[in-house]
Amino acid sequence: MLRAKIIATGSYTPERKLTNFDLEKIVDTSDEWITERTGIKERRIANEKQSTSDLAYEASKAALRQAGLKAKDIDLIIVATVTGDMPVPSTACLLQNLLDAKKAAAFDINAACSGFIYGLSIADSFIRSGTYKKILLVGAETLSKFTDWEDRTTCVLFGDGAGAVIIEAANGENGIISTEIHSDGSLWELLNLPGGGSKNPPSKETLNKRLHFLKMKGNETFKVAVRTLESLVVDTLKKNNLKSSQLSALIPHQANLRIIQATANRLGLSMDKVVVNLDRYGNTSAASIPIALDEAVRIGRIRHGDYVLLEAFGGGLTWASALIKW
Ligand code: COA
């Protein structure tokens, strides 16, 4: 059986840490509130010169190194991001240039926090159709550059980082077993960045109204996220005739510890099977799953033959899952 297999992972997070105590000095918040409501303790912040493609570049180099491949071996580069360097060209094209990956086609996808799993789904189809053999998939974000540092309801949540995987065509049982992607555009207003696009082109007014920053109706989003993710993970296992007891690891999008706990609970999974790193990085949108995956792989938490379930929920709204036999 031809399967798309993740043969290597890599990640990068900027050096600068911003703790909850640092945030107490910027907005009216507290370490206690942030920890209790979200589970986040600190996040990483890119420096002034670092854009999303720079973070993606570091993560990609680490993945290529682990795979023992050169950038010129890559057929296709997909970058999942909502914080690209610029509207045109794509961040994937900028990454292709940084890597000098001359052979690769390159494009971005925007599915917000579900972007990495959407990317897996696309990569899986391209591999199984025989179109591409070696794909570099990256989730990369510099959310700090689109965060309203005067809005305590959002600025405590997000962080910067990048994670990358190399996906290869492989014969056998190991690889991506299934992916599911879903959207509901009717709920777009729950999470958006309204300024700078064709609906609200950049102007003094859009700047004054702070439309170039991320907006979220957190509480409403929370409720939809819990409900949606609970049924998504149950459905994914059911469709693949797998019991949750057969899962070695759940790697959720890292938005909120309470959402993660609710999802694990619905599956009857103990938290020691759930990969959590949001205490250190906050919500890094499309980057959160590949960073967590890379950390889990590097410490030997995921081994050959393990069943691993990935799931995410984000702006769009979008949600997605991937079941992998490692
Ligand atoms: N510090 C202190 N108080 C804060 C605060 C902060 N940083 N942010 C909000 N508050 C206050 C609110 O003003 C509100 O006060 P009020 O009761 O006087 O009006 C109170 O805390 C509760 O706010 P609420 O928004 O109801 O809290 P919550 O329990 O829903 O937690 C989030 C807020 C954002 C942490 C949570 O809703 C969440 O994680 N949402 C989903 C995020 C997500 O999954 N997004 C999609 C993927 S990116």
Image (cartoon, rainbow, N blue to C red):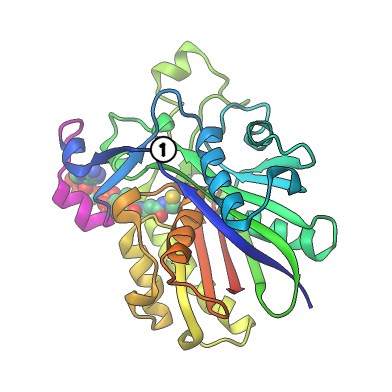
- Front one among 75 and 121: 75
Q: Quadrant of the N terminus?
A: bottom right
Dot 1 lies on which element? strand
**For residue 154, side relative to residue 284 (left or right):** left
Q: Residue at x 44, y 68 (%)?
A: 227
Q: Residue at x 37, y 42 (%)?
A: 159
* Above/below status of 35 relative to 18: below
Residue 130: give x, y in percent of width and height: 85, 61
* Above/below status of 60 relative to 126: above
| Res. 306 visible in picture | yes
Whether 27 is among the magenta residues is yes
Residue 220 sits in quarter: bottom left
Residue 115: give x, y in percent of width and height: 58, 51
Residue at numbered disc 1: 215
As shown in the figure, which amino acid type bears the numbered disc 1?
Answer: Lys
Q: Residue at x 55, y 57 (%)?
A: 9
| Region of the chain picked out in magenta, as a range | 25-39
Callout 1 crowding tier (Cα within 10 Å): few <14, some 14–19, many ≥20? many
Q: Residue at x 58, y 51 (%)?
A: 65
Whether 319 is among the magenta residues is no
**For residue 196, side relative to residue 256 (left or right):** right
